[in-house]
Amino acid sequence: MVNKSPALESLTAQERIVLMGRLWDSLDAAAAAPLSPALVAELARREADADADPDAGIPWDALRDELQARLR
């Protein structure tokens, strides 16, 4: 669980978004965990599937609505 910080709580939503962007940009790509060969292969397979049949998926809005309905 993350402890809430009064300093962060006082920021506006826009200021928090800017802060998140700066934190994200500060991450060193080389320090990130490398992708395993199995994960790279799975991502390539999924990309090929999506390219082969772009209409097979559902729009994000429909998926979001379906997931939200399940949580109600």
Image (tube, helix red, strand yellow):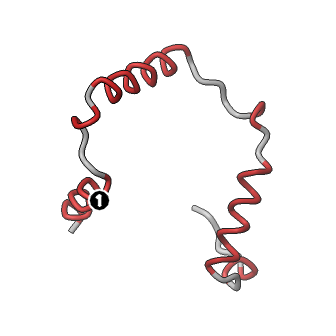
In percent of width and height, residue 5 lies at 70, 76
Quadrant for the N terminus in the image: bottom right
Question: Compared to 13, does 65 lie above or below?
Answer: above
Q: Label 1 sits on what residue type? A: Asp
Looking at the picture, tell me which residue is in the foreground, 46 or 32: 46
Residue at x 19% of width, y 60% of height: 70
Would you say 58 lies left or right of 40 here?
left
Residue at x 26% of width, y 53% of height: 63
Residue at x 66% of width, y 83% of height: 12
Counting every numbered tag in the picture gives: 1
Q: Quadrant of residue 14?
A: bottom right
Would you say 55 lies left or right of 32 here?
left
Residue tagged by mark 1? 61
Looking at the picture, tell me which residue is in the foreground, 11 or 58: 58
In percent of width and height, residue 21 lies at 70, 60
Would you say 28 lies left or right of 62 here?
right
In percent of width and height, residue 42 lies at 42, 20
Question: Compared to 19, does 59 lie above or below?
Answer: above
Question: Compared to 65, does 54 lie above or below?
Answer: above
Q: Quadrant of residue 29?
A: top right
Crowding around mark 1 (Cα neighbors within 10 Å: few <14, some 14 to 19, many 20+) is few
In percent of width and height, residue 41 lies at 46, 16
Q: Secondary structure at mark 1?
A: helix
Quadrant for the C terminus in the image: bottom left
